[in-house]
């Protein structure tokens, strides 16, 4: 296993609700630092392309992907890709506020944010200050642009 690794520690999944998590960096075995960036994803819908968060490991288990800094034809720029998501492609990290079933800025991507709140009063938690959160996360990831970095997802 190589270090450092980026972690996304998710709260327990709630059916029909956006998936919430927090980004951390593991610099050595079990040496973690909070990045003070939260995350919002679509609800878990059995990995349905464009409708679901990325697959979790089992409760308390880790699922390891790879973050790569690649060109996105959709966004016409380089950005972070979550590589190795079974049955999916184009899973990016980008700004956005909404990840509910009825309203979403995501088609299966990860939306960094600084906090969660029900911005539009629809009963779903939304991401707050997403652009600032993306900048903060990208600043931490900049040193991995050439090499990529392991990305560990853990569900609560």
Image (cartoon, grey):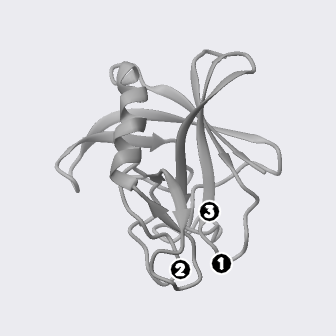
Residue 81, image x and y in percent?
40, 42
Residue 38, image x and y in percent?
55, 49
Total numbered circles: 3
| Quadrant that contains the N terminus | top right
Q: Tags 2 and 1 in contact by the CB under 8 Å rule?
A: yes
Q: Badge 3: few (under 14), some or many (20 or more) residues near its Cα, within 10 Å?
A: many
At x 64% / y 74%, what residue is drawn? Answer: 17
Residue pointed to by mark 1: 16
Q: Give residue 139's mark.
A: none
Residue pointed to by mark 3: 19
129 in relation to 45, above or below: above
Look at the numbered disc 1 and give the secondary structure of its residue. loop
Given the current orientation, which residue lies at the most extreme left position?
A: 76
Label 2 to label 1: alpha-carbon separation: 7 Å
Q: Give residue 101's mark.
A: 2
Question: In the picture provided, is 84 more to the left or to the right than 72?
Answer: right
30 in relation to 119, above or below: above
117 in relation to 38, above or below: below
Q: Nearer the viewer, residue 108 or 86?
A: 108
Q: Tags 2 and 3 in contact by the CB under 8 Å rule?
A: no
Q: Badge 1: few (under 14), some or many (20 or more) residues near its Cα, within 10 Å?
A: few
At x 53% / y 75%, what residue is drawn? Answer: 118
At x 43% / y 52%, what residue is drawn? Answer: 91
Question: In the picture provided, is 65 more to the left or to the right than 11?
Answer: left
Q: Which of 66 and 125 is in front in this view?
A: 125
* Among the two numbered marks 2 and 3 on one chain, the one whose residue lies closer to the N terminus: 3
Residue 71, image x and y in percent?
24, 40
Look at the numbered disc 3 and give the secondary structure of its residue. strand
Given the current orientation, which residue lies at the most extreme right position?
A: 59
Look at the numbered disc 2 and give the secondary structure of its residue. loop
Question: In the picture provided, is 71 more to the left or to the right than 125?
Answer: left
Q: Tags 1 and 3 in contact by the CB under 8 Å rule?
A: no
């Amino acid at each position: 296993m190589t270090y450092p690794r980026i972690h996304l520690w998710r709260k327990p999944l709630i059916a029909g609700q956006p998936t919430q998590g927090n980004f951390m960096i593991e610099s050595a075995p079990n040496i973690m630092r909070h990045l003070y960036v939260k995350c919002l994803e679509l609800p878990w819908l059995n990995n349905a392309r464009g409708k679901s968060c990325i697959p979790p490991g089992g409760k308390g288990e880790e699922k390891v992907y790879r973050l790569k800094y690649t060109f996105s034809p959709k966004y016409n720029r380089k950005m972070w890709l979550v590589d190795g998501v079974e049955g999916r492609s184009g899973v990016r990290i980008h700004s956005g506020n909404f990840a509910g079933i009825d309203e979403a800025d995501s088609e299966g991507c990860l939306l960094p944010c600084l906090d969660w709140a029900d911005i539009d009063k629809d009963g779903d938690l939304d991401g707050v200050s997403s652009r600032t959160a993306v900048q903060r996360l990208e600043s931490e990831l900049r040193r991995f642009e050439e090499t990529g970095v392991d990305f560990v997802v853990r569900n609560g």
